[in-house]
Amino acid sequence: MSQLFYQKECSSTNDEISKVLLYPNSDFVGLYTFNQTKGRGQYGNSWTSRAGQNLAYTLAVKIEDIPLTDFLFNYYTATAIREFLAKLTEKSVKIKWPNDIILAHKKVAGILIEKKKFNGENYFIIGAGINILQEKFDEISNAGSLFTQTGEHFNLKNLTENLHQFLTEKFKNYPSQEYILEEFNLNLFRKDEISVFEIDAKRQNGIIRKADEKGEIWIELEDGMKSFYHKEVKLLY
């Protein structure tokens, strides 16, 4: 059973989800708003969203039902949201390691997954921010929306309800770990392309070769193959 709740405005759906987890019979509980005032991204970053134009959505999934490591669950979540947006837009959609969704070379969605305990149950709290109708991103040059990248106007409520249904179905049955890794790497942004990275405050060329089951990214640099965790390397272009 799944339930989906709406708030006209909230600070952060990842924080507010606890208020609707008072319904113990639900295996999947979702919360969404089109006006999130204090959104958060990975590692303390903020997620800014314009009211009435974008989606802030959180899904709570009980950890005891998940046969995956934290890293593979993160990968599976990213591949699921990527797949949903690819089917919705009928465009090529990629995953920028580890948690951004790229459509036509612009970031249109970000994912934040946290672990929290409520009412004696442990949950993965999956937060997704999706830019849907916003037209201008003056302060963020690498950001876009479904509208800017496709020219289509999507109905916010219908999109949210379809996303919730799609994800709850995905989280009812998990594929093998090998399949998850393969899908994540198959859709990895700029994989096997020469890119510019910032490592230890220095820029250098490299080629993304793969993401592994430990959450690391492997990059072929001029002095050989090296692996990095998030925040140890930054993909510039």
Image (cartoon, rainbow, N blue to C red):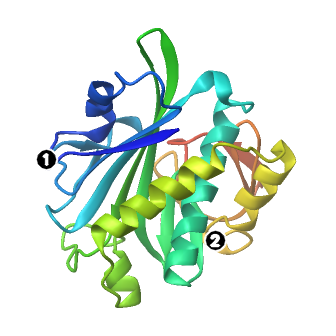
SS of the residue at dot 2?
Answer: loop
Kindly report the distance in space between the C-alpha atoms of the residues bearing marks 1 and 2: 36 Å
Q: Check residue 190 in the rendering and tell me which mark sits there, or answer none.
A: 2
Q: Amino acid at mark 1?
A: Glu
What is the crowding at mark 1: few (fewer than 14 residues within 10 Å), some, or many (at least 20)?
some
Q: Check residue 197 in the rendering and tell me which mark sits there, or answer none.
A: none
Q: Amino acid at mark 2?
A: Arg
Q: Which residue is mark 1?
A: 9
Q: Is residue 64 above or below residue 181?
A: above
Report whether 235 appears left or right of 192. left
Front residue of this view, candidates 16 and 47: 16
Percent x, y for residue 108?
40, 68
Nearest to N terminus: mark 1 or mark 2: 1
Percent x, y for residue 44?
33, 36
What is the crowding at mark 2: few (fewer than 14 residues within 10 Å), some, or many (at least 20)?
some
Identify the residue at image location x=50%, y=42%.
Answer: 231
Q: Is residue 76 above or below residue 82?
A: above
Percent x, y for residue 192?
74, 71
Front residue of this view, candidates 208 and 10: 10
Report whether 82 appears left or right of 67. left
**Quadrant of residue 232 within the rendered picture:** top right
